[in-house]
Image (tube, rainbow, N blue to C red):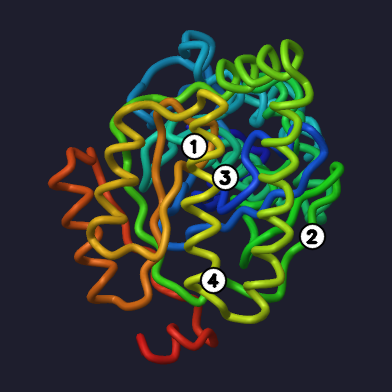
Amino acid sequence: MTSLAGHPGYGQTVAKIILFGEHSVVYGHPAVAMPLQSLKMTAEVEPSDGPGTLAGLGWSGPLDKAPARFSSIIRAAEVASAFAGHAGAHLHITTDAGFPAERGLGSSAAAAGAVIRAVLDAFDAPATPDEIFTLTQQAERVAHGRPSGLDAVATSADGPVHFRGGVVTELDVSPDAWIVIADSGIQGSTRETVGHVRARYEADPDSVGAVLARLGDITDEVIALLHERDTPAIGRRATEAHRLLASLGVSNDRLDILVNAALSAGALGAKLTGGGRGGCVIAFADSEESAHRIEHAFVTAGAAGTWVHAPEPGSLAGEVAR
């Protein structure tokens, strides 16, 4: 039964990929991430007089019995309800994801953001983008401790975002390429890989610091190349970035196999995206035909799932695609 306060609410966010800068961003270097508008996360919230429930992302049951992996969603509902002036509200929450969790695609931030938007909608509570960002960060701290904020912004952005020193800004250009994403089928752990790189850095700050600095330089170069629409050069930077990340110990055999499969199929470049040791690989293609050839190569190499992201309208390749 719906309570007198509120009505069914709806919220939506999307998946994201890190194009360049994973791991090095932790050390003050820049990163670029991009929302994937075709991979959506939705949430529906209905205020209720009875106990709260959660359904979605592979689980259904009472909200207070939800597994630990849903802690950020629960926190999202709490902080959004409090913001809306209905702290402690009982809610029926339903989520639906068009992409898998724990693959470096921003599932946690996307789910939290979608739930927050649904709760605000249910209670007709207006909020600015900055306020929604703050609420999402509060929820994300439960899952990631000290989230950078990149996922919270990227999963609700209209285009690529640039992150550096805690400041996130939207870029005015998008890659002039098809991007093919392959799911390795292995859950990644950003917390684990960030800790691994930290240990490597503390043991050998000069050598590891040089690798991280080069990854940062690559990101800066890519931003300039995006404006120049030099997709082949961006592809080369992607492959270089993967090799550098592998040297830090955050790749694995499965990711390397997928990267090499993409390159053999004609990709302009390929790399892991996100924390590594699982999750996804991205590859850059200069045509739709090439993108589907790379996608087939990913499947043949054992990818658990694939997605092809077309160029944004207005890019050279996007104009051809239309």
Q: Secondary structure at mark 1?
A: loop
Q: Could you tell me residue 90's position as x and y percent?
A: 60, 24
Q: Which residue is mark 3?
A: 114
Q: Earlier in the sequence, mark 4 or mark 3?
A: 3
- The CA span between labels 4 and 2 is 16 Å
Identify which amino acid the numbered label 3 is placed on: Ala
Identify which amino acid the numbered label 4 is placed on: Pro
Q: Earlier in the sequence, mark 4 or mark 2?
A: 2
- Residue at image x 85%, y 49%? 167
Query: Do callouts 3 and 1 mark residues in contact (Cβ within 8 Å)?
Result: no
Q: Which mark is residue 169?
A: 2
Identify which amino acid the numbered label 1 is placed on: Gly
Q: Which residue is mark 1?
A: 104
Query: Do callouts 3 and 2 mark residues in contact (Cβ within 8 Å)?
Result: no
Residue at the far front in the pictured view: 207
Q: Is residue 256 left or right of residue 112?
A: left
Judging depth in this view, the residue of 136 and 163 nearest the camera is 163
Q: Earlier in the sequence, mark 3 or mark 1?
A: 1
Q: Give the number of the mark in front: 4 or 2.
A: 4
- The CA span between labels 2 and 1 is 20 Å
| Crowd class of label 4 (few under 14; some 14 to 19; many from 20; radius 10 Å) | many
Q: Secondary structure at mark 4?
A: loop
Q: Earlier in the sequence, mark 3 or mark 2?
A: 3
